[in-house]
Amino acid sequence: MQGLEKEIQFIKGVGPNRSALLQKLGISTLEDLITYYPREYEDRSKPKAIAELVDGQENLIEAVVVSKMSEQRIRKNMAIYKLIVRDETGTCLLIWFNQSYLKNKFMIGQKYKFYGKVSIKSGKIEMNSPVYDEQEKTRNTGKIIPIYPATFGLAQTTIRQVMENAIQIINSEKDLLEETLPDYIKTEYKLEDIKTAINQIHFPADFNEFENARKRLVFEELLSMQLGLITLKNKYTKQEKGIAFDKRVIISDVINELPFKLTKAQLKVLEEIYNDMEKDKPMNRLLQGDVGSGKTVVSIISAYKAVKCGYQVAIMAPTAILASQHLESFENILNNFGIKCGLLIGSITKKKKEELLEKLRNGDIDILIGTHALLEENVTFKNLGLVVTDEQHRFGVRQRSIINKKGKNPDVLVMTATPIPRTLALILYGDLDISIIDELPPNRKKIDTFAVDKNMEDRVNSFIKKQIKEGRQIYVVCPLVEETEEINAKAVLELYEKYKNEIFSEYKVEYLHGKMRPKEKDFIMQEFKNGNIDILISTTVIEVGVNVPNASIMVVENAERFGLAQLHQLRGRVGRGEYQSYCILKYNSNSEVVKERMKIMQQTNDGFIIAQKDLELRGSGEFFGTKQHGIPEFKIANLFEDMPVLKTVQNLVIQIEEQDPKLELEKNKPLKNLIDKKFTDRIEI
Ligand code: ADP
Ligand code: MG
């Protein structure tokens, strides 16, 4: 119950109720709380004259009450309260709804501070639901006020109060908050100490203080990430001896058997991969390539090399659907070479599974393809030499290393279609070497993308019907509602009813969502693949890698709620066959940013450009925000804005690496503590 691990119930102002709400925000300890940084700030320090108030803005006034509070009941449960206040420049009407406790709060002739949203209608100045303070108090006004992110029913004032209490604990208990940066670094880069920074990030006296606090916290966050990644990389590649695959085993046999010519980019990454494989250091490589760029065949050829050298291969995919699809692709090519593949997914029978595992142990299976099921303890290989994980962002670092442990330092290839700009990828995946397929196979038809609003609904629907009549199939992806899988499922079902019963009653409509059992999902997906379903409505479960060449339209409902990178992934589900394909982004918003984002989707099919734009428009917080990415999440840094800091930090890390790679020097002790704490999960394994 000590120190920063102190549970939040022990903070003044936090009872069981608030504690539960805070837990929902991921806050369970004192440390979680003080690192729950404000989303933005409101400057409530400088009052404006009433005559200078601006319609639509939130402003602060200092004014004298000139009327009694009036109460007006408009409905049974609804009352409006009005108060007139005045300063030297004018009069303002304050309005509250249903706040009867305010009735006797204000005294005529007294001056108060009010802060709220101003509305000016034909010269009449009003302020809606203002917060207030008596003149000399500064509970809600008179300072810069932090505004916290999502609060799930916690009022901002409550969170603020709890935060104040937490900060007080930090300030009154000496040494509770230990310094995490060495003095020499703080001096050289002019950084605040940790206590000051934490105080000022939450309650800055002015924006200068905020800037300084933020600078320090961003620096620390990026530094610990970079150091952590470097340590991880050194641990895996420098200290361990890996498998040196036989140079004499050549891959041209299998390349010559392919039904197509590899692209230059595919050949280049293959060379990088087999160079790594032939070295006696373990390979630890990220293979990045846009959807459809042909990563799978690269993994097939790499697997061929491993098997021909006498080793087994594990291929891990995030869903059963994808794993089965991979099995098909692998067998198509490798069966001709006498290579045996097996499939391990959650839904296979116990008996079959036992047989499979037995064959795996004996070495009768060369390549095992599967889902998380591969991680289970009883899955043992005879001689695992290469591990490929597909769509890396679905697997955590820990899961990756569980599978790696099933061999003796096997080579590792991580494949991802998350298009991260190269500069950023180099930094974020500091623990991996990177290969990029930056070219699509020839003759790909461009997917035509249309952004449409409600007015176009009918035209879109008749276009869909026309395509179905021509034999094509349609995906419809539902708005992503973050909160829970249940809510997402509900949205899917509602849309399904509407499509099935109203608009598309003459067609076969089905649905898919994350709450369904794996068997059901596989069944529906298989039916769709076989062409027995015309329209498939789903959540983003189909985002990853599914291949149905006959599908020609991807409709995304409420496209404004998705990140561009994600829209791009979704769009990649169509245009996989010979048919001209379309992506229809339905949006429901007047925001300029939304329109700008839709425009980008229409203009380009290049995932890397899209990713870059997405970063610019939304910031890294949202870009990497979803838990699905295996990329470290940042509490305060924004990779786009803070790129210069990231570069500074990178140089610093290189210096530290040269001087003190194991962080053994006394002066670097705080750094050692910092990354030990933040990366224990990742480094121990
Ligand atoms: P992704 O990178 O999204 O995983 P896939 O590996 O699924 O892409 O490849 C998409 C499609 O392109 C597959 O049908 C595959 O057979 C085909 N393909 C891959 N490489 C080439 C190539 N060099 N020329 C033509 N088609 C290719
Ligand atoms: Mg793929």
Image (tube, rainbow, N blue to C red):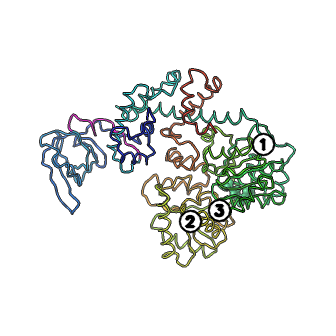
Residue placed under numbered mark 3 in the picture: 347
Q: Residue at x 36, y 51 (%)?
A: 153
Helix, strand or loop: magenta stretch? loop
State whether residue 442 appears in this view: no
Q: Determine whether the residue tagged by mark 3 lies in a helix, strand or loop.
A: loop
Residue 362 against residue 531 in the figure, above or below: above
Q: Residue at x 59, y 60 (%)?
A: 542
Between the C-alphas of marks 2 and 3, the distance is: 17 Å
In screen coordinates, is 258 left or right of 29? right
Between the C-alphas of marks 1 and 2, the distance is: 40 Å
In screen coordinates, is 596 left or right of 131? right
Q: Position of residue 458 (x, y in %)?
A: 48, 72
The quarter of the displayed image where residue 46 is located: top left
The stretch of residues the image draws in magenta is 134-149
Residue 462 against residue 395 in the figure, above or below: below
Residue placed under numbered mark 1 in the picture: 277
* 114 or 138, nearer to the observer: 138
Going by the numbered disc 2, the residue's amino acid type is Leu
Q: Position of residue 539 (x, y in %)?
A: 54, 61
Q: Residue furthest bottom?
A: 506
* 599 or 430, nearer to the observer: 430
Residue placed under numbered mark 2 in the picture: 512
Give the mark nearer the N terminus: 2 vs 3: 3
Going by the numbered disc 1, the residue's amino acid type is Met
Local packing at callout 3 (Cα closer than 10 Å; few below 14, some 14-19, many 20+) is few
